[in-house]
Image (cartoon, rainbow, N blue to C red):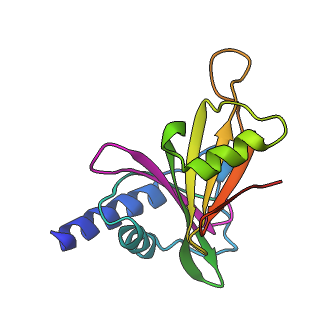
Amino acid sequence: MTIIRHAIIASAMTAAACSPPSPDTSRTESAGPPAPAQVAALISAAVPDVTITSGELSAGNDQYEVTGTLPNGDEIEIDIVRSDGEWAVQEIQRDVEWSSVPGPVRAAAAAAPGSFEPVRVIESLQTADGSVVYELFRQAAGSGASRGPAMEVRWFEGTAEVIP
C-alpha cells in the first residue's frame, strides 16, 4: 500500500511539474530542473496520509506549494523549499477554528493592541523548530476575511507571543 501511495504521489507531482505554469510562476532555466519524486517523498514523510490535489513550482524553481487533503477531509498546504540543492519541508498549513487554538494564543491575541475576533485562522507548523504560527484574519469590508493576516501569534514550548 505504501509503495502504491508513493507511486501515486510521485505521479501527481510529476504531472504538476509538467503542467504549464500560471503566468506568475513561469520557470527560469537558471535554477535547473525540479525534483518531483524527491518532493513527493518529502511530503509523504511529513504528512503520510495526505492525498495531493495540486502542486505549483515557483518561478525560481526553488519552492513548491503543494495542496492536499487529509483522510478526515481537512485541506492542507505544504510549502517546500530548495536550498543548496536540497529540498526541505518548510511549513505545513491548515485552516482551524478559533475556538480550537490554544488558550494562551487566544489570550495573547486578545491582549494585543487592536485586538479583534478573527474570521479566519491559519495554523502553520514551522518544521525548522516545531513552533506553530497562527495567522489571524480580520473581517474585511464586505463579507469575507482580509486578504492577508492582520496578526500573527507564535506558539512555541508553551509560550505565546504576538509577532510584530
Q: Residue at x 52, y 50 (%)?
A: 20
Asked if one can make out residue 56 in the rendered structure from this viewpoint, the answer is yes
In this rendering, would 43 be left or right of 78? left
Indicate the quadrant containing the N terminus: top left, top right, bottom left or bottom right: bottom left
| Residue with the most extreme top position | 142
Identify the magenta region.
59-80
What percent of the width, then of the height, locates residue 133?
63, 56
What percent of the width, then of the height, locates residue 136?
66, 41
Residue situated in front as seen by the camera: 156 or 158: 158
* In the image, residue 67 lies in the stretch drawn in magenta: yes
Based on the displayed image, in which of its 4 quarters is residue 6 positioned?
Answer: bottom left
In this rendering, would 155 be left or right of 54? right
| Residue with the most extreme left position | 1
In this rendering, would 129 be left or right of 151? left
What percent of the width, then of the height, locates residue 137?
67, 36
Q: Residue at x 72, y 23 (%)?
A: 140
Residue situated in front as seen by the camera: 139 or 113: 113
Q: Residue at x 58, y 40 (%)?
A: 121
Residue situated in front as seen by the camera: 106 or 4: 106
